């Protein structure tokens, strides 16, 4: 009986390890996207500034 319990615990560890590895891989891939997204955002901000004639964007509430 104790052997069955150890076997089940080992199966649980393997399953949890697989889930953890999958989660870590996903987290790493998302972390790698951040610099690319930041670069793209800066590029788009630059293009936007060119489109508005290099004027500062008024963030006030102009109703």
Image: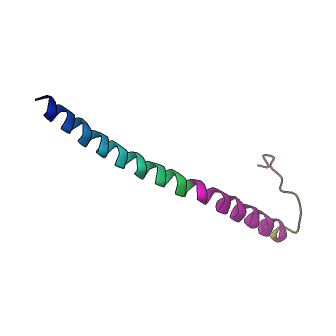
Would you say 52 lies left or right of 28 here? right
Q: How is the image coloured?
A: rainbow
> Viewer-proximal residue, 53 or 13?
13
Identity of the residue drawn at 88% across and 69% down: 53
Residue at the front extreme, as displayed: 3
Identity of the residue drawn at 63% across and 56% down: 34
Coordinates of residue 30 in the picture (x, y in percent): 55, 55
Coordinates of residue 63 in the picture (x, y in percent): 76, 49
Please tell me how many numbered marks the rendered image carries: 0
Residue at the left extreme, as displayed: 1
> Viewer-proximal residue, 29 or 49?
29
Q: Eyeballing the image, is 50 above or below 7? A: below
Residue at the top extreme, as displayed: 2
Coordinates of residue 43 in the picture (x, y in percent): 75, 67
| Secondary structure, magenta segment, majority class | helix
**In the image, which residues are magenta?**
31-50
Q: Quadrant of residue 44?
A: bottom right
Q: Eyeballing the image, is 43 above or below 1? A: below
Would you say 54 lies left or right of 30 here? right
Q: Eyeballing the image, is 38 above or below 62? A: below
> Viewer-proximal residue, 33 or 46?
33
Residue 40: within the magenta?
Answer: yes
Residue 47: within the magenta?
Answer: yes
Q: Which quarter shows the N terminus? A: top left
Identity of the residue drawn at 26% across and 39% down: 10
């Amino acid at each position: 009986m104790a052997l069955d319990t150890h076997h089940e615990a080992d199966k649980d560890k393997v399953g949890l390890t697989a889930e953890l590895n999958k989660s870590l891989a996903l987290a790493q891939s998302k972390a790698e996207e951040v610099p690319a997204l930041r670069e793209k955002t800066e590029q788009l901000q630059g293009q936007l500034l060119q489109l508005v004639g290099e004027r500062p964007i008024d963030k006030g509430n102009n109703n």
